[in-house]
Image (cartoon, grey):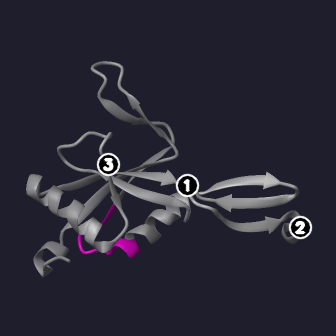
Amino acid sequence: MTTSSSSNKKIKFHYGYGGTITPGKNGGKLRYEGGTNGIMKMDRGITYTELVVKLWDVCGPSMRLRCKLPHDDLDSLVHVWSDEDLAYVLEEYDQCSEDLKIRAILDDTLRFSWANDELYCFRPKDFIMQVHTTEASR
C-alpha cells in the first residue's frame, strides 16, 4: 500500500462520532456539530483493520467510516471499507499536502429495538442480525 519512506510519516484523523452534519450559519457551508470529536495520530502505513480497531476504542464496534476528500465538502464523503479505500483517501491527501490531516466521520450503523421482551440488533437497511432475550441478559 505504501512505500517505506512514506510509511514513516504520521497522519492525523480528525474524527467525529455521534453528531450531525448541518448547514453553517453564514454561507451554508456544511459543518459537523455535536457528538464526540477528537484527533488520532498514527503511522502512515496503518492498515484499514488496524485503523478500525483504534476507532472502536472511541465509538465501539458499531460504526461506518467515511472520510472527506481534500477538495470536497461534507456532502460527498467517501466510504472506507478496505485497505484499497484507505489507500485512495491517503493518496488524495498526499497530492494536496505534506501534512496529512484527514477529516473522518464515524456513523453508528447498528440500531437496537425491544419487542416482546427481546432485544433486536439490526443495521438500518439490513435484515435483523441477532436476537437477545431479556432472560439471557439477566
Which element type, helix, strand or loop, lies under badge 3?
A: loop
Residue ID for mark 2: 138
Of the residues tagged 3 and 2, which is closer to the observer? 3
Q: Which mark is residue 134?
A: none
Horizontal side of residue 53 vs 133, given as left or right: left
Give whichever of discs 3 and 2 has the lower sequence position. 3
Foreground of the two, 85 or 32: 85
Viewer-closest of 128 and 25: 128
Observer-nearest residue: 11 or 124? Answer: 124
Q: Which numbered dot is residue 125?
A: 1
Q: Along the horizontal axis of the image, is 119 left or right of 138?
A: left
Q: Is residue 48 visible?
A: yes
Extreme residue toward the top, this view: 26
Kind of residue at disc 2 = Arg
> What residue would you read off at disc 3?
77
Residue 63: horizontal and vertical position, in percent?
A: 50, 59
Q: Reading the chain from its start, which is encountered first: label 3 or label 1?
A: 3
Report how far apart the C-alphas of labels 3 and 2 lie in the structure: 41 Å
Q: Which residues are magenta?
A: 41-50
Residue at position x 16%, y 57% in the image: 92
Query: Residue 134 lies in what quarter of the image?
Result: bottom right
Residue 43 appears in view? no
Please give the name of the residue rendered at 88% of the width and 58% of the height, measured from the top-left corner: 117
Is the residue 1 above or below the residue 19 in the image? below
Q: Residue at x 33, y 32 (%)?
A: 30
Sequence-wise, which precedes: disc 2 or disc 1?
Answer: 1
